[in-house]
Image: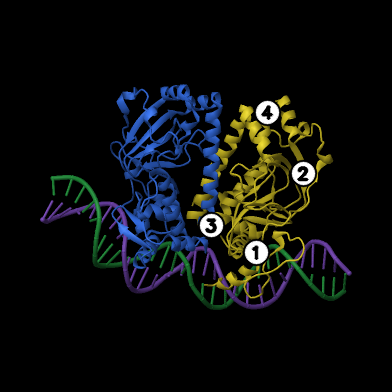
Chain colours: A yellow, B blue, C green, D purple
Amino acid sequence: MRNEWLSTCTLTMQGPVNRQDVVLKLTGSRSVMEAHLPTNPGPIASLTPCGGGQCASVCAECRVRLYAVCAALDRDEINELERITQHISLPAKTALFHAGDAAASVYTVTSGTLRLQRDLADGRRQVIGFAIPGDFIGLAMDDHFGFSADSLTPVNLCRFDRQAFARLAHEKHGLMGRLHDFASHELGLAQEHMVVLGRRRAEERVAAFLLRWRERMARLTGASATLALPMGRQDIADHLGLTIETVSRTLARWMREKVILDVPDGIRILDQARLEETVAG
Amino acid sequence: MRNEWLSTCTLTMQGPVNRQDVVLKLTGSRSVMEAHLPTNPGPIASLTPCGGGQCASVCAECRVRLYAVCAALDRDEINELERITQHISLPAKTALFHAGDAAASVYTVTSGTLRLQRDLADGRRQVIGFAIPGDFIGLAMDDHFGFSADSLTPVNLCRFDRQAFARLAHEKHGLMGRLHDFASHELGLAQEHMVVLGRRRAEERVAAFLLRWRERMARLTGASATLALPMGRQDIADHLGLTIETVSRTLARWMREKVILDVPDGIRILDQARLEETVAG
DNA sequence: ATCTCTCCATGATCTGGATCAAAATCCCCG
DNA sequence: CGGGGATTTTGATCCAGATCATGGAGAGAT
């Protein structure tokens, strides 16, 4: 009904097109302004292999090694893994891959934050999650990615050829076990998020998100008073199944009530107990 | 606010209490009537080990073996697995385990349907999914189950001691790989369900559910005109983040419009294309 | 400094689906 | 076959959060 006109809308692009940039810019309807056009995936941003792909023993000094899947491997195996590894950097706000792309690679995040999302044809989107250092990207794929990945900040990743990585996982039992631990853990989190999306009120969703994000960041950087939020309000909304207005209003209310404090690029949680009560109901 | 009085409500039970039976039965508020009390988990229904736990080579004639995790094992390994297997039957509408229980066992479903759910303190519930023959239960657990499992129909399961099963998985590489495949696949489905819960309208949710359930049943029994729905309307609603009224109205409308046909214990899909259009938007 | 663009905040209004209510149907079980 | 609880259906009304509209604050660019 409301989006019917979309079905007859055709645009022709000249030159290479990054799909992330192709949004309908029509005034008068905010939601349509943000609709991504279902173009063929264009070339993604060029990637910079670190040291020309020839970095020896970068892993040895990797800060996330003990959190990542790599922790399953001993020194020799790490070297073996490193042979199929490409260390790459991605600028902020750049696509790593798109939903539906052939999954040629899998990744471990070593720094920065990525947004993982699925898009519906009419522009609605669900942010599946945010990937942070130590996270493995590519657990839930067949031959094709089921979601898109975009950097929110500059990001560094280890890229592994998927076939080669799968071969290694089948040789090295510890690696497969570790992959399975990651997948099980992710599955548990996904199920928890289903409860949030299916049965929680707006305020509870935002509180649950802040507490969980704080937890994840604490694992990386240790407990910190301020909480960096590299994702925008719209991203939070799309993660929680809300609108940007609802997220904004909820945070604004908590700021008025001194539950949280606004700081540049994030917040500071002043009253964690209050957020926990909100989640507990 | 609305449920504040619950915080002062205390009931004392005499004799063993099956948590599934403990619901507040107060007229005047439907949602509270259905609230499960947070009692300590009582003893679950007694389980009947098939043949006193001494069934030799039951696996050989198992109808779901090729779909289940067991498919990863050769004849000798199957025998080894069978030594740590207990074949059990569960009557309909019976708890297998509760969220928070120590996860002593993991399971493969061989017949029947189970409902997997998480409950919030105030009675809201999210049905994580439904387990059918071939499904493995226990992928996403740490030491404790993150959700409850109840039979909707009579159910037969293979119960494995979790420690022993984990040990076997660490010895038999194929089994671990298969477990990981199951976990990745589940993760992909969970992510898809997030889109449904976060961004889809009521009608789209129900259509997506029917199509997906049909797909799963088709894998088991082959394509069939009628679709058995062992779960109730409330279960569907709690799976889709809707109310029973919305589910009921949506199905009723489709029946009026000859998209589906009411049959005992299920439906018949008359116009699959219509449902697919609904999901596609 | 000014322009532009993107993101965020906030008030006003609307609405899809929740809630409330009541009747109808189903399903055991004796 | 009939009584009583559980589940489902259907109608009326309500409301949390969506939608619409507008203004403001920052960050880059020139």
Residue A67, can we see it? no
| Residue placed most toward the observer, A175 or D24 | A175
| Viewer-nearest of discs 4 and 3 | 4
Q: Could you tell me how far apart the alpha carbons at marks 4 and 3 are, in whole angstroms?
A: 38 Å
Q: Could you tell me how far apart the alpha carbons at marks 3 and 2 are, in whole angstroms?
A: 32 Å
Numbered disc 4: secondary structure: loop
Task: Indicate whether B106 appears above or below B76.
Answer: below
Where is mark 2, residue-wise? A88
Q: Whole-percent x and y of residue A75?
A: 73, 25
| Viewer-nearest of discs 3 and 1 | 1
Where is mark 4, residue-wise? A73
Q: Could you say which disc has been placed on residue B198 in the image?
A: 3
Q: Could you tell me how far apart the alpha carbons at marks 3 and 1 are, in whole angstroms?
A: 20 Å
| Residue placed most toward the observer, A68 or C10 | A68
| Residue placed most toward the observer, B63 or B16 | B63
Q: Whole-percent x and y of residue B250?
A: 39, 63
Q: Amino acid at mark 1?
A: Leu
Badge 4 density bin: few <14, some 14–19, many ≥20, Cα 10 Å: some
Badge 1 density bin: few <14, some 14–19, many ≥20, Cα 10 Å: some
Numbered disc 3: secondary structure: helix
Q: Amino acid at mark 2?
A: Ile
Q: Amino acid at mark 3?
A: Gly
Numbered disc 2: secondary structure: strand
Residue A134, can we see it? yes
Q: Are marks 2 and 4 on the same chain?
A: yes
Q: Amino acid at mark 4?
A: Leu
Q: Whole-percent x and y of residue B83?
A: 41, 22
Q: Whole-percent x and y of residue A131?
A: 66, 46
Badge 2 density bin: few <14, some 14–19, many ≥20, Cα 10 Å: many
Q: Could you say which disc has been placed on residue A37 in the image?
A: 1
